[in-house]
Structures are given as C-alpha cells and as structure tokens.
Image (cartoon, grey):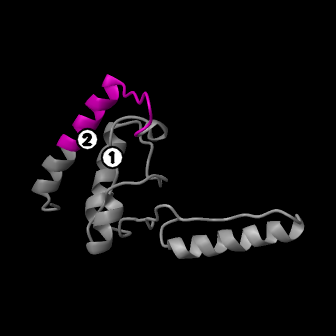
Amino acid sequence: PHSGEQSDEVLRTLRDMASDFCKKAPGLAIDIETIDARNAIESPKGNIATKHLLQVANKISRGEGERGLAFFTDGALVVPHYPQLPFAILGPGQPEQCHTPNEEIALDDILVAKDIYHTFISEATSLSLL
C-alpha cells in the first residue's frame, strides 16, 4: 500500500480485479491470501527534524532527495503508536540491494553516511531538534 492506504483497501481492490479477470476467462480461479500485512508509513509533512535531515543529506551526499521505498522497516511497528514521531530511512547503499542476498555497500557510501549522521546530530542538538 501507498502511504495513507490501508491493507484492507488494497486487498479489496485486488479481489475486485481478480473477479473481473475470472469473469473474462472461464475456468480461471484466483485466490488472494494475505500472508503478512503492514500499513505504509510516512513522516508528518513539514516536520522540522526530517526537513533538516534531508537538507544535511543533500548537502553532503549526491542529493538524491526524498523518495518512498517499498519494503518493510521497523518503523511500520513504531510509527502507528507514535504518529508524530519523525521517521526517515537513511543509510548507506542502494535501496534496491537493501536486505538482499549478496548485498554490498561501497566504503565511500559508508563514509558519506557517517558524515551525514554526525552533521545532523551535531546540528540538530544545537538547534534543539532532538
């Protein structure tokens, strides 16, 4: 699901699509089963801490900017209980390789991430963001 979209909405849409396919193809049977459902999460828009983190990251790194990612993170378990808690995924490496077999991270990416973390924590502390 996209942020703001609940798993039951997605499941209902998929079941409707499956029903349409089955009507068009006699004998076709599609069974949709939810194995594990986690709702999408997103930091509150305009949060000063996440804005500052993005500014620091863009200043130090290649400036890839803000984007959504479609994979599970612990934030899906924490954010629903603390909806105003700023949340961001920021780490070295390419998102496409995150938690995959043979994942690799360039040493330069680790050093850039270290600089981002250090700068953000130093500045956020002095700005009372943390």
Residue 88 image-quadrant placement = bottom left
**Disc 1 from disc 2: Cα separation:** 9 Å
Q: Residue 116 shows which numbered tag?
A: 2
| Observer-nearest of 20 and 114 | 20
Q: Neighbour class for label 2 at 10 Å: few (<14), some, many (≥20)?
A: many
Q: Is residue 23 above or below residue 106?
A: below
**Residue 101 in magenta stretch:** yes
Task: Say which residue appears at 14% left-offset and 59% top-offset.
Answer: 127
Residue extending farthest top: 107
Q: Is residue 117 visible?
A: yes
Determine whether label 1 and label 2 are within 8 Å by CB: yes
Task: Say which residue appears at 57% left-offset and 76% top-offset.
Answer: 9
| Observer-nearest of 54 and 92 | 92
Q: Nearer the viewer, mark 1 or mark 2?
A: 1
Q: Under tag 1, what secondary structure?
A: loop
Q: Where residue 81 sits in the image (x, y, percent)?
A: 27, 73
- Highlighted range, magenta: 99-118
Q: Neighbour class for label 1 at 10 Å: few (<14), some, many (≥20)?
A: few
Q: Where residue 121 sits in the image (x, y, percent)?
A: 16, 49
Residue type, label 2: Ile
> Which residue corresponds to mark 1?
90
Residue 37 in the figure: left or right of residue 43: right
Residue 50 in the figure: left or right of residue 121: right
Quadrant that contains the C terminus:
bottom left
Q: Residue 124 shows which numbered tag?
A: none
